[in-house]
Amino acid sequence: MKYGIYLPTRGPLAEPDAITAIAGGAESMGYTTIVVGDHIVFPVHVGSKYPYTIDGGFPGQGDALEQLSLLAFVAGVTERARLVTSVMILPHRNPLVTAKVLATVDVLSKGRLTVGVGVGWMREEFQALDAADFDKRGRVSDEYLELLKKCWTRDPVAHHGEFYDFDALHCMPHPIQKPHPPIWIGGHSVRSLRRVVRHGDGWHPVGATSASPLPPAELQTLLDRLKRFADADGRDLDSITIAFKAPSYDPGRVPPGHDRLRFTGEPAQIAEDLLAYEALGVDEVSFDFRSPPIPRTLDRMQHFMEEIAPLLR
């Protein structure tokens, strides 16, 4: 199994030296993946419910480094780790500009980009950005995924769709990875699972939170559904990467009906959790070790690699 870390995007760790230290530490410790979240603005008044906390409140404080700019910076201070947008909200940005920026990051990172995508949850942010219609964000996202792939694989390229339209143009250079950077689809709704099969190279669900625990039995049910969709579409489920995210929300709160939160407790308990997910076909898990100051975050990362990861070998 591979392991990843969440990179800070806000708060006291969201500054160049801390980001460089954490990203460099991740590489030196053997983490495979660095994931970066996405918010551009935070309206003062938000009525939309965040899906991964029990009370629906978003845990951020209204500050966030812009995701794609941050990834370009991290590409310059790392050498091996895979850089993942986790997840990029597809309808937030002009899709043609997004195609170019992502291709640029893949070139600058020498082919280390993975494009994790989602459809978004905060209506107020969509409105502030003058983004696509929030109520049509799923269809918009599907079309934008088609557009990204066209821009990354064709020259010249044209697109005439329901939500975006342009005549033939050059959008070069293409990404280094062929045919394009891997695309991971976030979410675990029926529509998200269908999107994985139709457009994705991987599935990137959030679990191990009090509001969205996704224990192995529940994950198995979703994987069975994903396999049915894949079979119907002529795809092999084994060709789809399963990349599980375990962020730290609602600390100390146990999900209703559970004895504890997954990936908490003693090293042996966490290793047992990981083995259960690995047995289901999970390829990697990304953890949230972020906790200021910098040494504390690095200590938590090191503890996992020294005390827990060896128990799976």
Image: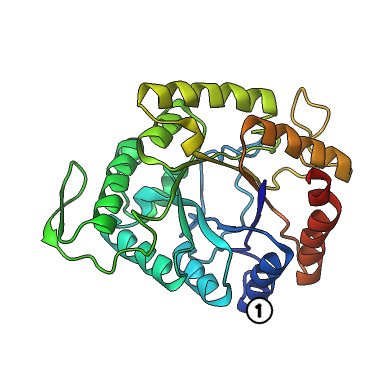
Query: Which residue is farthest bottom?
Result: 17
Q: Nearer the viewer, residue 121 or 87?
A: 87
Q: How is the image coloured?
A: rainbow
Q: Residue furthest left?
A: 167
Left or right relative to 139: residue 268: right
**Which amino acid does the dot numbered 1 rest on?**
Asp
| Residue 12 visible (yes or no) | no
Residue 158 spot, x, y in % from top left? 14, 54
Q: In the image, what residue occupies the spot 74% across and 39% down?
A: 274
Task: Say if 87 sits above or below 82 in the image.
Answer: above
How packed mark 1 is, by other alpha carbons closer than 10 Å (few <14, some 14-19, many 20 or more), is few
Residue 284 percent across, percent down from the top left: 63, 46
Point out residue 300 in the picture as x, y percentages from the top left corner: 80, 59
Instruction: Name the residue rendered at 64%, 75% in the picture.
Output: 20
Residue 254, quarter of the rendered image: top right
What is the x, y in percent for residue 24?
A: 66, 72
Residue shown at 77%/45% (left/top)? 251
Q: Nearer the viewer, residue 134 or 181?
A: 181
> What residue is shown with label 1?
17
In this view, the residue in front, 311 or 223, is 311
Where 178 sits versus 273, above or below?
below
Q: Secondary structure at mark 1?
A: helix
Q: Is residue 171 left or right of residue 201?
A: left
Residue occupying the far front of the picture: 313
Is residue 291 in view from this perspective?
yes
How many numbered discs sit on the rendered protein?
1
Task: Report whether 162 appears left or right of 292.
Answer: left
Q: Is residue 269 left or right of residue 230?
A: right
